[in-house]
Image: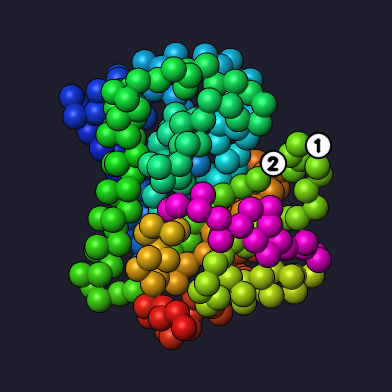
């Protein structure tokens, strides 16, 4: 799998948490993609800055769903190629700072995740929190704003698509959905997308605001960058065991490409949403 036009911010004194060998706070793939679409992956990485010593976790924990959305990096890479769309991927684990949370949300740097104690997030000082925000949260937000500004300069209202994945089982509950479509008020992408996915010959179980809800305040990236600006948008959740391999990620990229094709081909989609 080859990155297209991969952009990595320079490591410098501006980002003191990011040391030699650490990844940048975000990466952009297919930056020159021609589609009027922006893909984002808030939880695509399980990396931890070396200075944080894995937050006190072992490697096994960092490979679990608490650290990142398993399979989303692969899925977004493939979907970006199918749609010819630029994509922005988070560089670090949501355990360091959750990029899909507002700064006011207590879970932005969780001390506990699915019954796992995150020792590196306990008893943090304001200075430590602010450093994570400055080095990781703000650059990601700025990267999204910059890409959206480029569309605006071309007088384009882009479609904003956020990609996540969910663990097949949570708190002893086996989740029956193959995928979920999260949304709040704007139905332009999510409603026909659900219909198209449910019509697939494989008979997928597609959640409507399941296993999470787009009406919840924790859906910060969509709320902040897309919904507030009236951009057509959707958040898509795929079950992790379906996209944790290259083969699975490519299959679901193809499925989503087919399901989105007619929706994204409609020129009427690319308008600012006026709620009633």
Judge whether residue 197 is colored magenta: no
In the rendered image, residue 111, in percent from the top left (x then y), is placed at: 53, 25
Where is mark 2, residue-wise? 167
Magenta segment, which residues?
A: 202-221
In the rendered image, residue 90, in percent from the top left (x then y), is placed at: 42, 41
Quadrant position of residue 30: bottom left
Label drawn at residue 106: none
* Residue at figure coordinates x 75%, y 74% from the top left: 199
* Residue at figure coordinates x 44%, y 14% from the top left: 53
* Residue at figure coordinates x 69%, y 75% from the top left: 195
Pick out the residue farthest to the bottom: 268
Q: Residues within 10 Å of mark 1 (few under 14, many from 20)?
A: few
* Residue at figure coordinates x 76%, y 36% from the top left: 171
Can I make out residue 127 in this image? yes
Where is mark 1, residue-wise? 172
Q: Which one is nearer the viewer's eye here, 49 or 209?
A: 209
Q: Is residue 151 left or right of residue 238?
A: left
In the rendered image, residue 88, in percent from the top left (x then y), is placed at: 39, 49
């Amino acid at each position: 799998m080859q990155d297209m036009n991969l952009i990595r911010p320079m490591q410098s004194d501006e980002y003191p948490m990011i040391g030699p060998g650490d990844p940048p706070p975000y990466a952009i793939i297919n930056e020159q993609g021609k589609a009027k679409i922006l893909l984002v992956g808030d939880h695509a990485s399980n990396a931890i800055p070396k200075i944080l010593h894995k937050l006190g976790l072992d490697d096994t924990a960092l490979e679990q769903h608490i650290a990142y959305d398993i399979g989303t990096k692969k899925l977004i890479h493939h979907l970006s190629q199918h749609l010819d769309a630029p994509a922005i991927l988070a560089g670090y684990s949501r355990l360091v700072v959750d990029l899909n949370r507002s700064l006011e949300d207590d879970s932005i740097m969780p001390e506990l995740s699915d019954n796992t104690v995150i020792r590196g997030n306990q008893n943090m000082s304001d200075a430590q929190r602010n450093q994570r925000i400055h080095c990781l949260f703000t650059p990601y937000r700025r990267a999204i704003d910059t890409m959206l500004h480029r569309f605006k300069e071309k007088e384009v209202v882009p479609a904003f698509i956020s990609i996540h994945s969910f663990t097949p089982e949570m708190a002893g509950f086996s989740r029956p959905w193959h995928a979920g479509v999260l949304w709040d008020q704007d139905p332009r992408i999510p409603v026909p997308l659900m219909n198209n996915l449910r019509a697939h010959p494989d008979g997928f179980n597609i959640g409507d605001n399941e296993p999470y809800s787009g009406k919840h305040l924790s859906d910060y990236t969509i709320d902040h960058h897309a919904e507030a600006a009236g951009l057509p948008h959707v958040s898509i959740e795929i079950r992790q065991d379906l996209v944790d391999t290259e083969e699975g990620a490519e299959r679901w990229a193809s499925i989503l490409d087919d399901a989105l094709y007619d929706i994204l081909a409609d020129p009427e989609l690319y308008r600012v949403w006026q709620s009633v």
